[in-house]
Amino acid sequence: MKKICIILLAVSLILPSCGRGPSVIRTATPSRPAGQEDMLGFTADPIPDVGVGIVGVGMRGSSAVKRLTLVPGCHIAAICDVEPDRTGKMLEFLSGKGLSANEYSGGETSYQELCEDPSVDLVYVCTDWAHHVPVALYAMEHGKHVAIEVPSAESVKDCWDLVNTAERTRRHCTILENCCYDFFELQSLAMAQAGVLGEIIHVEGAYNHNLEPWWDLYWRNWRLDFNRTHRGDLYPTHGFGPVCQALDIHRGDRLTTLVSMDTDPFNGPRNVEARDGKPCNDFKNGDVTTTMIRTAKGKTILLEHDVMTPRPYSRMYQLVGTDGYIGKYPTRQICLGGGTTADVTFDSTGKELVFTGKDLDSLMAKYPNPILTPELRSDAKAAGGHGGMDYIMDYRLMYCLNRGLPLDMDVYDLAEWCCITELSAISLENGSVPVEIPDFTRGAWDKVKGFSYAL
């Protein structure tokens, strides 16, 4: 019997390295370089009229040019694109409004001239994904604040490079995550912060958006090709950003580990074959990728990525609390339990209350978000841009820069939300094992208590 017990003990010690793999894949958190400090609550000198330099004026960037002409506290100082006809169209648009801007175009490094332009205070990056980080790093090295379209970075190394450069140069580096400014998300966050849902313990977010009809709108089909050559949640931030704010990530809690699983690529190869007219046997990304994340305080997050199937558009957006629930997809709904602090009346059975439609709107109106003033709401709806949330995003960015306030989203938000792409791929390539998520704040994640807007 003693001999058998010794053998079983030996086997149990060997098994983790013989087929099952490591229990958690560790990721390095490098020491902060000498002389650097964290950027939590960072403020810079006020800029009364922000000179914006926009790099990349294709589909997303051209919309930004038009929208920013409506945002107070800023002006378009310069525009840049590798395609001169694009910058030409934007100059023509500005001229029609009695405005002008410096032009940089025609070369892969034309953005460097824009970043060196003394009239530019903020470099607004709207290029294809591969150029986000090089442009942002060069801009910060030349004294500019940076705002980067989503996803702002595709690798953990790029996330660290942005964090370290922002800390060293003391320049803002923010992510242009418009979904954090959707009206429903703004009001839901206000309700959560008011304690109506109790303690938030689980959240869900997604980017489920059938892009098959859209592939040709992306310059040279680069987005389809990116899915062909990469695996994982390639576009996490739309669903991830708003729920991270509700969980106070790096403002009292932090992300610790993730596990990902995906389907095989079914529709992806078919889309490439339809475009190229020949079989595609090397498509990497699964049609549906699912990622589960755990936080240091024992909360969980569910993320989904699906740009290949025809299911309806959804960012999922669900907040699950100890005393209530708010969800946007597929139905806007609030459910409140008996422990809620909301001013509601339960029947004699004391069972949960469910709010939809006008009843939901009336309940949410009792908990206004502090930044969503009636004037801003009206201006955003008039300006448009994904229903107005693009305008609110730009308005808040300029509002904070004008007044020298901390930005709503800092470089750590950017890194945490974007690192999911590579980390999910690592989990998938290793049989869906847990992967550690780096602490980009390097231990300062509990320094600030709770997400808030600077006013």
Image (cartoon, rainbow, N blue to C red):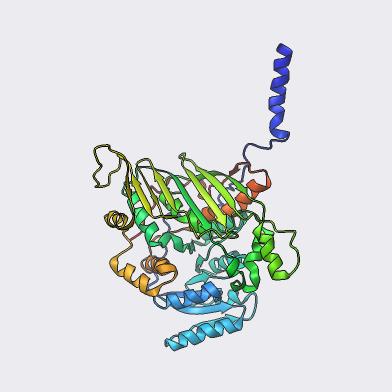
Q: From the viewer's perspective, is residue 448 above or below residue 66?
A: above
Image position of 359 (left or right of 56) = left
Q: From the viewer's perspective, is residue 164 above or below residue 87?
A: above
Q: x and y percent of residue 402 in the render?
A: 38, 69
Residue closer to the observer: 406 or 208: 208
Residue closer to the observer: 330 or 371: 330
Judge whether residue 100 can be spotted in this image: no
Q: Quadrant of the N terminus?
A: top right
Q: Quadrant of residue 373?
A: bottom left
Q: x and y percent of residue 295 in the render?
A: 49, 43
Label count reads: 0
**Residue sticking out furthest to the top:** 1
Q: x and y percent of residue 68 in the render?
A: 43, 75
Residue closer to the observer: 181 or 112: 181
Image position of 409 (left or right of 367) = right
Residue that appears at 34% across and 54% down: 356
